[in-house]
Image: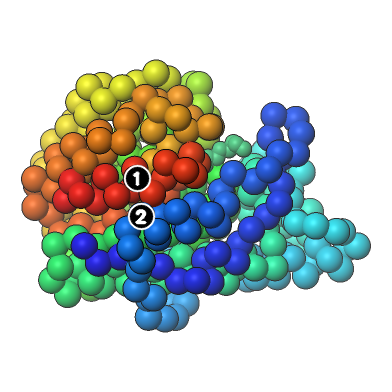
Amino acid sequence: MRAFFHPDQLRHAPALELHNGGFTAYAEVPARADMILTAIGGAEVPADRGEAPILRVHDADYCRFLREAPALWQAAGRAGEAIPYAFPIVGRRPLRLDRIDALLGRHGFDATTPITAETWDAAYASAQTALAATQTVLDGERVAFALCRPPGHHAGADYCGGYCHLNVAAIAAQAARDAGRARVAILDIDYHHGNGTQDIFYDRADVFYASVHADPASDYPFYWGHADERGEGDGAGTTLNLPLPQGTDLATFRAAQATALDAITAFAPDFLVVSFGADTWEGDPISRFRLTTPDYALLAADIAAHGWPTAIVMEGGYAVDALGANVASFRSGF
Ligand code: OKS
Ligand code: ZN
């Protein structure tokens, strides 16, 4: 299976995140990518397809914000990485916002996703990696792997959060649509709900979003991912959320994934994007499912059995020493 990765993706490396009332070491570290690269024997550098496919998903103002926030932060006299602290909880009126702190709260939904001077370039490269894998599959390969980091599924059209800035799965799905694939499905099997991906396609009938994840009653991102969120307008019925309790093991996870695959089968996609997170692993430091390394090959084989042309994009997974083996196991199942 061809794999893609750009070295610029390593440049996003915040030191700290605000979590549980204090600063802790940032969990989404560049070493995650190094471990995966070593385990899978390297990856190809993606071509640069420019900003246009990113702007098919994200607002231009938001992309400008990601590029300019570090300089505005510095101009305000701040050291370190840009982190929000005030959020527009009552609606988001189209106010003209100049103050960096207002912009950070407007375009972010948590304090755990710092923006550094390197963030835009790394997120841009991560998006190019997703686009390269997508193009490989559009050109006829059965499956391809995008070693995306920073990850993407918490990022919406105009907001970041959950270590995500550009929604690589959504960018891949939209690129497949723009290449003429009429019906695209996204299967999200990261531990966390992909709220950004859901939001981006919530009112669209042409992109189906199915997610298996930890119940938002107990886990981040808390405000999305409940079973009653099913899409709206033209997209009514094209969102499927399957929340599961902490402690979930292979049997329960596999059954939920089968339910998602049945729904995707009924949708009859001509392209699939898999948002793959290895934070469902039993030893993940921030998650509470109990999948084992060999389980990933079984889950992947269940997906592969459907035969859909598939681009896999990497999302979470924070047990750095186990990450390479878990990704290798998932790839082997295809
Ligand atoms: C920990 C709380 C934030 C969790 C972010 C989850 C990132 C992830 N500071 N999403 O799939 O893995
Ligand atoms: Zn996750």
Name the residue located 38 percent from the left edge and 49 percent from the top edge. 324
The residue beneath circle 1 is 325
Q: Position of residue 329 (x, y in %)?
A: 26, 45
Amino acid type at circle 1 is: Ala
Q: Position of residue 240 (x, y in %)?
A: 29, 36
Image-based side of 268 in relation to 109, left or right: left
Is 101 in front, or is 143?
143
Image-based side of 329 in relation to 59, left or right: left
Check the image and report above or below for 215 versus 200: above
Say if residue 87 shows up in the picture. Answer: no
Amino acid type at circle 2 is: Ala
Q: Position of residue 334 (x, y in %)?
A: 16, 51
Q: CA distance from mark 1 to mark 2?
A: 6 Å
Residue contact at pointers 1 and 2, CB within 8 angstroms: yes
Is 241 in front, or is 234?
241
- Taking the image in four quarters, ligand 1 sits in the one at top right
Which quadrant: the N terminus? bottom left
Image-based side of 162 in relation to 102, left or right: left
